[in-house]
Image (spheres, grey):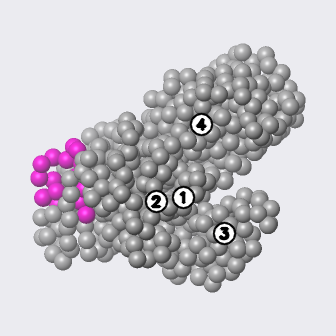
Amino acid sequence: MLDTLDAAAVRRWCAGGLAALRRHQGEIDDLNVYPVPDGDTGTNLVLTLTSAQQALAMDLETVGDGGSTPHGHALRLMARGALLGARGNSGVILSQILRGLAEALAAAPVVRGRQLAAALRAATAAAYAAVARPVEGTLLSVIAAAARAAEAADSDDLCTVAGEAAGAAARALARTPEQLPALARAGVVDAGGRGLCLLFDALVEVITGESPQRPAPARRQVRPPATAARESGSEEYAYEVQFLLDADAEAVTRMRETLAGLGDSLVVVGDGAAPQESGTWNVHVHVNDVGAAVEAGVVAGRPYGISVTRFADQVPSPAPAPAPAPAPAPAPAPAPAPDGRAAVVVASGAGIAALFTGEGATVVPGNPSTRELLDAILATAAARVVVLPNDPNTQAVASAAAREAHAQGVKVSVVPTRSPVQALAALAVRDPERRFADDVIAMAEAAGACRYAEICWASREALTVAGPCRPGDVLALVEGEVHLIGVDLVDTCAAVVDRMLGGGGELVTLLCGADAPDGLADAVREHVARCWPFVEVQVYPGGQPHYPLLVGVE
């Protein structure tokens, strides 16, 4: 048993945690709340920790310039490697947990029980700060429970504190379906939380020499869908705007006054930086004028991770993550624009990539790491770059890459597109004659005004908000939530387009996937022409995997 955590133990923890994640990778991937064939949390965690291990392998023994201890330096390398290799929300949050541990333990002469407990509290704060809208019943609840148990142990014994933290993490994981209705509907525990529990157990094994014996979480009995309460606030305001902001406290105070005059449900929280220093802030407000809200952030400092949600389209659950894919090098970057601007777009499918390349954008294959996005941003040689992630699970990676690029002198704004059809809408309104900040606002507004749908086949039996589905059923997801379950692909595609146009729309964009049968797009186009004669339809070969049709309505 170890009395303290040293650099060699950090190396063994990383290797042991990675081995555990690899053993359970398929199990974690299957803990997907959606019955679509692209759950990849296990894969993302494996790729993230693989990058951390590679960073350790390159340089473990050298103490950094900051004078940190050998174990602190090792943890910093591990955290830095995880950040640059982070995939998806789960990978980004894990990298921030490691960063919190590293910062708390960097200067500690020895790491015993109380030091580990304090570090877990710092890791929890870093994890929550990494998420624009923290949700309980996720990986966040698991790390928070571990930190509370470690502090409650009130001991210098490293084995005791690590064991209490790991046990509390496992119990918190079991409670996640009680906290998040989407998990209860699917009969699963949180996938990211399951991965974190494996890392805690790996840490216990390194410290004690014994592996905790815990059964894999059992699938719970699926219960009927629960309704999610809408956020409070006046119905007078149609949009929710949220972004992260780098600014000083005085500028934030002025921005707060401006936003208070634009809407309601205003929440502005910071990272605890000294008043005279620039800090990171999380800004949330309900407004009707999206542009004015974002412009207030631009005046105050550097906004990024901008999210715009129209309440008329809001749904409670996140969209499914993209399927893991090999990570070839980004497509060759076009020559930088004369004014030093560029666009980087994440896309899966040769047809979609060709569309974005034709719009002058640099294309990065789907599910990129922070390093791959950062390389693509820097390869543009532009001073100002807009990034379109095209998937909720890539937004955190895009924001991390933007922060890394900012440190190298490149101004990057992330427009939070959740589908390629939203990115097409955003790129269509680009105007090099506008100020860069105004152009980003216009792109965000265009993307937010484009509703999107995805049609796929169910990969397993599940209970969705639209009812039960079986393998092979056709699922139509609107804004990430299952709205229709059908048997015939063409009929379901036509029905979801009808449902979307029922809320208004003048332009329908159809992107045909790699598995789309011949005649699918023509059949849907003919249906729209017959039932919605004043609506324009644009059809493109997308080539995306898993989804035979992507639909955008503007």
**In front: 135, or 44?**
44
Q: Amino acid type of disc 2?
A: Ala
Q: Give the image quarter of residue 195.
A: top right
Of label 2 and label 1, which has the lower sequence position? Answer: 2
Q: Residue at x 47, y 34 (%)?
A: 43
- Residue 315 pos. (x, y %): 46, 61
| Residue 379 seen anywhere in this rendered image of the structure | yes
Q: Answer whether labels 2 and 3 touch (C-beta < 8 Å).
A: no
Residue under label 2, please give it: 382
Q: Please report contact status of discs 2 and 1: CB closer than 8 Å, yes or no.
A: yes
Residue 321: give x, y in percent of width and height.
Answer: 43, 46
In the picture, the disc for residue 267 is 3
Instruction: Point out the tag, 2 or 3, that comes first from the N-terminus.
Output: 3
| Label ID, residue 81 | 4
In three-dimensional space, the C-alpha distance between marks 3 and 4, rounded to whole angstroms, equals 33 Å
Amino acid identity at mark 1: Val
Mark 1 neighbour density, 10 Å: few (under 14) some (14–19) many (20 or more): some
Which residue is identified by label 1?
410
Circle 3 sits in a helix, a strand or a loop, which is it?
strand
* Number of the front mark, 3 or 1: 1
Q: Quadrant of the N terminus?
A: top right
**Hey, what amino acid is under mark 4?**
Gly
Figure check: 338 above or below 63: below
State yes or no: residue 511 in magenta: yes
Q: Which mark is residue 135?
A: none
Residues drawn in magenta: 509-524
Gap in Å between the C-alphas at discs 2 and 3? 34 Å
Q: Which callout, 3 or 4, points to the residue nearer the camera?
A: 4
* Residues at marks 3 and 1 touching, judged by CB atoms closer than 8 Å: no
Disc on the earlier residue, 4 or 1: 4
